[in-house]
Image (spheres, helix red, strand yellow):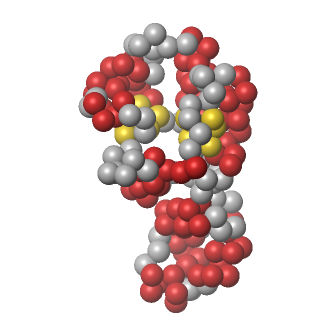
Amino acid sequence: WDWKKEAITHLKKLCEETGAKIVISSDWRKNNSIDRLKLLFGLHGLAEHVVGVTPTLYAKLRGLEIESYLKEHPADVFTILDDRRYDLFSHFPEDQVVHCENYLDVAAYQKALKALMKPCVPPEFLGFDSMCRNSPRIRTLNLKSQDFGVICRYKQYSYEEFWQIFC
């Protein structure tokens, strides 16, 4: 559990400067309860920022596990920090996935900070639920604002394409 000090410093700064919370999607969640994970992160002063874990799906599809978590816990902004390159993250916008080669270094920190400072949904779509009351198709599908972000990320629709398809 001897973590690289620079990575810890960067992670703390991300949480403190942006209000970001940590949701663990690593394999650590499979053998540790959320309380144990908070204890481990607490060794480095990060326990207060740990708020959950992604569900574990049978096929080990980390990208889909993250989507599932986001559907249940919608977020206006988020970033995925991972030390591996996964094709399973390809449906997320490129600027929201931060590959940390060996640890959260300066370059990875700056990319994550930029992602956390930019809403995933443009401001004109933040009133999604009220705007969609006028769309019979969306009413029929019973889509909510959290579905909008998931659909756009998963299908790689631009917001304009979404409106053309669903409205």
**Residue at (65, 78) in percent of width and height:** 163
Which image quadrant for residue 10? top right
User: Vertical placement of 42 versus 90: above or below?
Assistant: above
**Residue at (43, 78) in percent of width and height:** 142
Residue 25 image offset from top left, x and y in percent: 43, 39
How many callouts does the rendering have?
Answer: 0
For residue 113, side relative to residue 23 (left or right) = right
Residue 161 image offset from top left, x and y in percent: 69, 75
**Residue at (63, 35) in percent of width and height:** 99
Decide if residue 70 is in sight here: no
Decide if residue 112 is in sight here: yes
User: Vertical placement of 13 versus 44: above or below?
Assistant: below
Pick the residue in front: 103 or 147.
Answer: 103
Which image quadrant for residue 44? top left
For residue 15, side relative to residue 121 (left or right) = left
Pick the residue in front: 3 or 45.
Answer: 3
**Residue at (29, 24) in percent of width and height:** 36
Quadrant location, the N terminus: top left
User: Vertical placement of 132 versus 110: above or below?
Assistant: below
For residue 152, side relative to residue 107 (left or right) = left
